[in-house]
Image: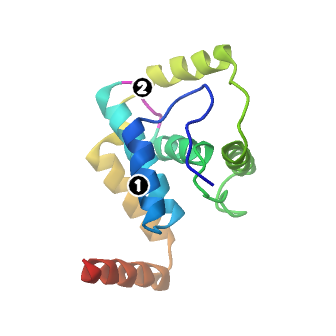
Amino acid sequence: MLLRTPKGGVMPDKSTLENAREDRREGKAASTQAGEFVKEEMDHIREGKHGARSTKQAIAIGLSKARRAGVKLPPPKKGKASGRAREQAARDARRGKTPGRKPSPARSRAAERALKKEGRGAASKSSLARHARRAAAKRSAAARSRSAKRAAATRKKK
């Protein structure tokens, strides 16, 4: 599936879509492709375009955009996220596969207004570092070790 711009609604930046497409061409993982959208979201918060209640919410918004743009990112497994979040992720993934309807302008405005009222601290270096540490702490030692070995192998290739 080609990465595409969603019909109506919030558009990812052209550069974000291009970077994600490039990652896809290079055979990188879906999570790496989605990382481009998360990075864009953090930039939007830092620029003051809108805020987020937490770093977790900011990441979720970026992942949602990625799914809607056609990144083959599966919804979280049972137990990893709430039922509502999983259902929404599945909806976003379906939306990325088929050209969707234009979103309701009233809903879009309401979401945008709500986000504008939120703080900008969610994208700060300290809150991102805190989130990363907490996420890592939830993983097993074996999972962290595997991840580190993969990263080292990637660095060795370059």
Give the amino acid type for the residue marked by disc 1 in the picture. Answer: His
Q: Can residue 35 be seen in this view?
A: no
Return the residue nearer the eye: 117 or 74: 74
Which quarter of the image is occupied by the C terminus? bottom left
The question of residue 97 being in magenta is answered with no
Badge 2 crowding class, 10 Å Cα cut-off, few under 14, some 14 to 19, many 20 or more, is: many
Count of numbered tags: 2
In the rendered image, the vertical position of residue 130 relative to residue 112, given as above or below: below
Residue at x-position 48% and y-position 86%: 142
Which residue corresponds to mark 2?
50
- The disc placed on residue 131 is 1
Which quarter of the image is occupied by the N terminus? bottom right
Q: Position of residue 57 (x, y in %)?
A: 51, 41
Return the residue nearer the eye: 147 or 157: 157
Give the amino acid type for the residue marked by disc 2 in the picture. Answer: His
Q: Position of residue 32 (x, y in %)?
A: 45, 61
Q: Where is residue 140 in the image (x, y as percent from the top left)?
A: 50, 79
Return the residue nearer the eye: 37 or 79: 37
Segment tinted magenta in the rendering? 49-53
| Prevailing SS of the magenta stretch | loop
